[in-house]
Image: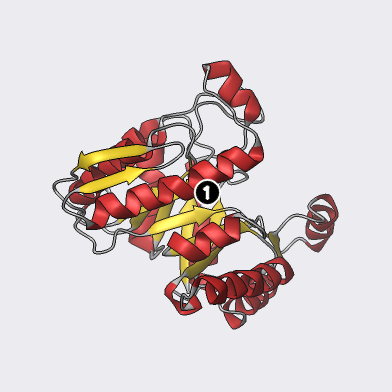
């Protein structure tokens, strides 16, 4: 199983690089960024543009996988996004994962004047976007005449270093999102408990059967919060507060047992957001305790 960080809490680029480099030195497998223009909880919080920031990280953090968790398809034309990802794959030496979803933050769209379509249209656009991206990654010259996107003898050169550059679909909608995942994705991510993941993975497998695809071709990752402490009173309080949300809460042994449950059901990667990690000095202690005591790196 891979273990990765989603860097969400840092507002200075230098600190972001320090945290990513610490993750790399200590054995983490990936560094992810959310793709938002403002923070959902407080629009006044500074937020870097994700893809430009990933380019900076790629130049300074040489080993771990990097990607978006996940980009909103509504923000960029899929052909432009494919070009961006392919370029970054060369900058990074072949380490990019293109994370993509339908988009969900209506407030963010309105604030920036970006059209926010109804959920059905957003998902239909995501379906077409995935096909556009896959065609550009694999074909020398691409034509596409969809309802929302068109290509006319479009080329993407140079191609990504990776063959294929992984396309990750984010989201757990069982009727449409998981069907799109079954059709196009190399990887899939959702916030989920062990029980949630087990159920949604079975739905994904059924969609794969419907579209004629081997489910083993799609790697599965879960995003889950981490609260690592020996203070049982604090852990009980956090469990009560986080009830209904996927979270690893407890001491080293308890969290290790929870991680093993994810591995047993076939989860390939755990992605841990750093929302609650605080400053780098404290964050490094949490990161080290997890990767050494839980992951065994």
Residue 76: image quadrant is: top left
| Residue denoted by label 1 | 283
- Seen as rendered, the residue at the extreme bottom is 264
Question: Is 211 on the left-hand or right-hand side of 77?
Answer: right
Question: Is 96 on the left-hand or right-hand side of 110?
Answer: left
Local SS, label 1: helix
Q: Is residue 117 visible?
A: yes
Q: Position of residue 78 (x, y in %)?
A: 37, 40
Residue sitting at x 66%, y 55%: 173
Nearest the viewer among 163 and 244 is 163
Q: Is residue 44 visible?
A: no
| Vertical comparison of 259 with 109: above or below | below
Q: Position of residue 116 (x, y in %)?
A: 59, 28
Residue sitting at x 67%, y 30%: 41
Nearest the viewer among 296 and 107 is 107
Q: Position of residue 229 (x, y in %)?
A: 69, 60
Q: Residues within 10 Å of mark 1 (few under 14, many from 20)?
A: some
Residue 163: image quadrant is: bottom left
């Amino acid at each position: 199983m891979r273990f990765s960080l989603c860097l969400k809490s840092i507002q200075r680029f230098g600190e972001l690089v320090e945290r990513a480099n610490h993750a790399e030195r200590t054995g983490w497998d990936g560094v992810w960024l959310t793709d938002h223009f403002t923070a959902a909880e407080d629009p006044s919080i500074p937020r870097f543009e994700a893809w430009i920031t990933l380019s900076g990280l790629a130049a300074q953090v040489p080993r771990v996988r990097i990607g978006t968790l996940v980009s909103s398809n509504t923000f960029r034309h899929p052909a432009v996004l494919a070009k961006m990802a392919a370029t970054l794959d060369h900058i990074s030496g072949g380490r990019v994962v293109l994370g993509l979803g339908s988009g969900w933050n209506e407030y963010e769209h309105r604030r920036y004047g970006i059209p926010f379509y109804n959920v059905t249209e957003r998902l239909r656009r995501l379906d077409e976007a995935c096909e556009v991206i896959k065609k550009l990654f694999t074909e020398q010259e691409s034509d596409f005449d969809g309802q929302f996107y068109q290509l006319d003898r479009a080329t993407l050169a140079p191609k990504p270093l990776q063959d294929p550059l992984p396309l990750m679909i984010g989201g757990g909608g069982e009727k449409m999102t998981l069907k799109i995942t079954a059709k196009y994705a190399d990887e899939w991510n959702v916030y989920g408990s062990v029980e949630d993941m087990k159920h949604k993975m079975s739905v994904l497998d059924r969609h794969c059967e419907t579209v004629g695809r081997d489910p083993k071709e799609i790697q599965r990752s879960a995003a889950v919060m981490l609260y690592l402490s020996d203070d049982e009173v604090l852990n009980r309080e956090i469990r009560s507060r986080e009830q209904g949300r996927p979270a690893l809460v407890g001491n080293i042994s308890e969290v290790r047992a929870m991680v093993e449950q994810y591995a047993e059901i076939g989860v390939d990667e755990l992605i841990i957001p750093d929302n609650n990690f605080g400053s780098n000095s404290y964050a490094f202690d949490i990161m080290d305790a997890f990767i050494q005591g839980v992951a065994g790196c």
